[in-house]
Image (cartoon, grey):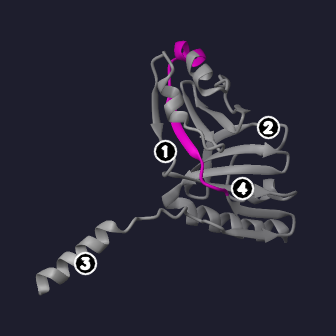
């Protein structure tokens, strides 16, 4: 009798499906002139490639991989961010498969799916720059960090990738394990920026 009960419990557990809940799902905070909100999940890849592979990868991905520091390129819901001379973060918000697209490229490259590792947070509004500057040492003025600029930097004690999406809007990419810290930091900074 006990064996039958254990077998039924094991069967019930093995038939259930696990559901991944996005970190920070639905979280947002607002203060005067700034809003901090979790962005929906997206497909992401970490891409490394030598110069001679860039053209082939750009064709396969449907977006030209930028070659200059602090630059990005966007096309059809896919954004490529320059992180180093041979390194890009590719974010696809359109639900396509950038990893699969890279497999079509002829050139030498390394593409690793990091969709579940990263979380994105938007910071928008007239005080967005002040909010992020509360913990980021980088000059975020429009002259130094224009729309489309991106970089790997820090926010408080955490490494982030920062993308300016509009004059008063930023996308903050961070590791999932640090997302609560980053969101809370930005929420507090938003309150300070509003004061």
Q: CA distance from mark 3 to mark 4?
A: 43 Å
The residue at which mark 4 appears reads as 122
Whether pointer 3 and pointer 2 mark residues with C-beta atoms closer than 8 Å, the reply is no
Disc nearest the viewer among 1 and 3:
3
Q: Quadrant of residue 183?
A: bottom right
Q: Quadrant of the C terminus?
A: bottom right
Is 22 in front, or is 122? Answer: 22
The residue at which mark 1 appears reads as 114
Mark 3 or mark 2: which comes first in sequence?
Answer: 3
Q: Position of residue 10 (x, y in %)?
A: 23, 73
Whether pointer 1 and pointer 3 mark residues with C-beta atoms closer than 8 Å, the reply is no
Mark 4: few/some/many CA within 10 Å (<14, 14-19, 20+): many
Mark 4 or mark 2: which comes first in sequence?
Answer: 4
Mark 4 or mark 1: which comes first in sequence?
Answer: 1
Mark 3: few/some/many CA within 10 Å (<14, 14-19, 20+): few
Q: Looking at the image, can residue 7 be seen?
A: yes
The residue at which mark 2 appears reads as 144
Q: Quadrant of residue 147?
A: top right
Task: Tell me the magenta residue range.
Answer: 39-55
Q: Position of residue 101 (x, y in %)?
A: 53, 29
**Residue at 46% over, 64% down:** 19
């Amino acid at each position: 009798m006990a064996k039958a009960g254990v077998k039924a419990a094991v069967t019930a557990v093995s038939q259930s499906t696990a559901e991944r809940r996005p970190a920070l799902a639905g979280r947002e905070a607002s203060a005067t002139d700034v809003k901090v909100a979790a962005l929906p999940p997206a497909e992401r890849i970490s891409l490394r490639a030598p110069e001679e592979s860039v053209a082939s990868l750009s064709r396969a991905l449907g977006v030209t991989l930028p070659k200059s520091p602090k630059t990005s390129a966007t096309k059809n819901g896919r954004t490529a961010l320059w992180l180093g001379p041979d390194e890009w973060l590719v974010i696809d918000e359109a639900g396509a498969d950038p990893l699969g697209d890279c497999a079509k490229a002829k050139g030498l490259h390394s593409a690793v799916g990091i969709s579940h590792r990263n979380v994105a947070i938007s910071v928008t509004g007239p005080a967005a720059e002040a909010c992020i500057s509360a913990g980021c040492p980088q000059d975020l003025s429009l002259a130094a960090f224009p729309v489309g600029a991106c970089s790997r930097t820090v926010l408080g004690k955490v490494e982030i990738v920062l993308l300016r999406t509009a004059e008063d809007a930023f996308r903050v990419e961070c590791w999932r394990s640090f997302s609560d810290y980053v969101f809370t930091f930005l929420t507090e900074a938003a309150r300070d920026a509003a004061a």
